[in-house]
Image (cartoon, helix red, strand yellow):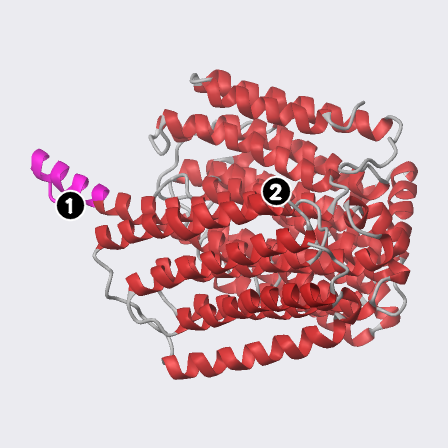
Amino acid sequence: MSPNDPLMTSLALDVAHLFAGGLVVVSFMLLYQDRMTAVINIFALHALVVSLSVAWQAAIQDAPHLYITAAIALVVKAVVIPLALHRIVMRLGIHRTIEPVVGTGLTMLAGIGLVALSIMVMLPITQQAGTLAREDLSFALSVILLGLLLMISRRNAVSQVIGFMSIENGLILAATAAKGMPLVVEISVAFSILVALIVIGIFLFRIRERFETVDIHLLHEHRGEQP
Amino acid sequence: MNVTSLLLVPALGAALLALIGDERKAAWLNVLVSFLTFGCALGVLLGERPSPGPFLIVDDLNVVFILISTLVGFTTSVFSRSYIAHELEVGHLTHAYLRFYHAMYQTLMFGMNLALLANNIGLMWVAVELATLTTVLMVGIYRTPAALEAAWKYFLLGSVGIALALFGTILVYLAARAVVGEGLDAMAWHILVANAAGFDPALLNLAFVFLLLGYGTKVGLVPLHAWLPDAHAEGPTPISAVLSGLLLNVALFAVLRFKSIMSSNPAALAPGPLMVTLGLASVVFAALMLYRRQDIKRLFAYSSIEHMGVITFAFGMGGTLANFAGLLHMVLHSLTKSAIFFCVGHVAQVKGTQRMAEIRGLTVSHPTLGWSLGLGVVAIAGLPPMGLFMTEFLIVTTTFARAPALAIILGVALLVGLGALLLRLNGLAFGDPDGRSDPDTASFLPIGLHLAIVLAAGIWLPPALVAWFQYVASLLN
């Protein structure tokens, strides 16, 4: 793509902003879900949007290594982790339960406030950074703050993990918008490992706990002991 | 001595330890690898400084941190050998977990050395994340519900902290890119500090807020400290010692690096007042919380929050004298706190509990252990003649000349903390012993070594050491 073509450049920016803005919208969608399976599906959409956004950045910045980051986001976060989470949720029988700490309306209002805040904070101070980075960064900060809001407004582990992963998507958006930043791929790999460990963590934490209780119960009965 | 040896030795050690099944050999190998790493650190200290590469750097600041980190890493491995042998005997840990534990111990050392040596803000971030992850895994190693919950809490809060720190790192890169140009140069420390004067101050300000909150979570500054007491109390005691003595320092080191970028830019927000506020809040909060503790490891975890607050406060005040006192306080706190955790680990083993109400009369039932713990608590409470008295005295007096109100708050908070610690010590060390009392198998070498250094520092500091620390302190301005 020729960088000197003004029409293409403005189209390229518009598409980049479309994806980044879409990510903020999907973050809002995460906030008002009341069923666990729906939250996981919306998160898969979140990861899909971020991977499209990164792939588009790779194309317009002429940075092929970013395709790796996009592929990781697509495979790990849009497919593998949602499947694993669905499995956990089914095994634990918690697919209907979401325990919000405050009501959905209040959470949405707080979310709108956070987006306004991040735009007001980021836009004036990133004037040097170029149009692309400038608006993507304010969207990225919105996604990060909405992710934090999701983490504190839900009680169960799976929702908290999804909140954390949406924060991570916001960070990847920010890192790719900072044109030419080294180590983005390495950082996204490090993050994927972190997320994978978290998911394995809840899997082991909940499932093992159940199996171990059952085991100990059996053991006591076998040996004629009362717990 | 080559700098990469500091990374290669623990990395190879971790790989070897993952393969060795026999736990006695593994424990000895762990000690050996840690000792070799310490040797490498001495070599780096005494050898010629290599010029900064794209990824690694040795300068006067990180050499202090590396030296204390590898020293405490080595002594903790010695303590770990006797601690782990006992845990295996009573069946708290199985062989498979033990192999995992030793491999993780060296991975943690690798992560911390990499974070300290990194000349790249992205690489440092990855290294701090690696160090955090390994400690999370080790905190949950006993697999009791309490340990898993502590690990989970640490994991979530640590991850949020690390996410905020990454956003700050990206903003610093953006600020640097406009001046230095794209690529690795815009993330290298020595280039960032040299060019910081030209960076956009507004971008730097925002970045520093994120970095301070992000890495501050790992330092355990109030109000981001919630993970710290749980992680200290529920994990194996060698890990509590390494967490308090080393990992908190590594996170603080990251904050200091970014602070020096901020200070090099005259138009940017002064980082001092932010650090002073967080530090003072930590000291006051932790000093009050010390009174309500019932678990011995939680007590000393809160004491770590207090001391990290003191150190952050000192660096926030700035000036050569305060920086000097802060740096020395950090080194002495690492030594004292790890010595205390070594004692506490053995105490919890001989008494079979961590509840302070059930531990009495240690100086009667286990004289060496009891008196060592007593000496450690006297040191950590900041009483003369131990070294921490001198550094706290320096910090309070130098603050008094510049901001009397802050000095009074700090001084009163330190006295309140001292009262709580002495009150607890009275119950733990004196009176009639009761309850379970197994013979101790402690190795007193690490405890004695640490406390001797802290005592010596309180009485007489070698002029060469003073000159070295003063030079580093002046660099931090």
Q: Which residue matches tag 2?
A: A186
Q: Is residue B17 above or below residue B117?
A: above
The spot of residue B90 in percent (x, y) is 34, 30
Which chain letter matches label 2?
A
Q: Which residue matches tag 1?
A: A227
| Residue at the image point whose x is 66% and y is 67% from the top | B413
Q: Depth check: B231 or A65 in front?
A: A65
Instruction: Give the quadrant of the N terminus of chain A.
Output: bottom right
- Point out the tag, 1 or 2, that comes first from the N-terminus: 2
Q: Depth check: B383 or B476 in front?
A: B476
From this viewpoint, is residue B283 visible? Answer: no
Considering the numbered disc 1 on the image, is that residue within a helix, a strand or a loop? loop
Q: In this view, does B40 lie above or below B294?
A: above
Whole-Å distance between the Cαs marked 1 and 2?
49 Å
Instruction: Give the quadrant of the C terminus of chain A.
Output: top left
| Amino acid found under the numbered disc labelled 1 | Pro
From this viewpoint, is residue B259 visible? Answer: yes
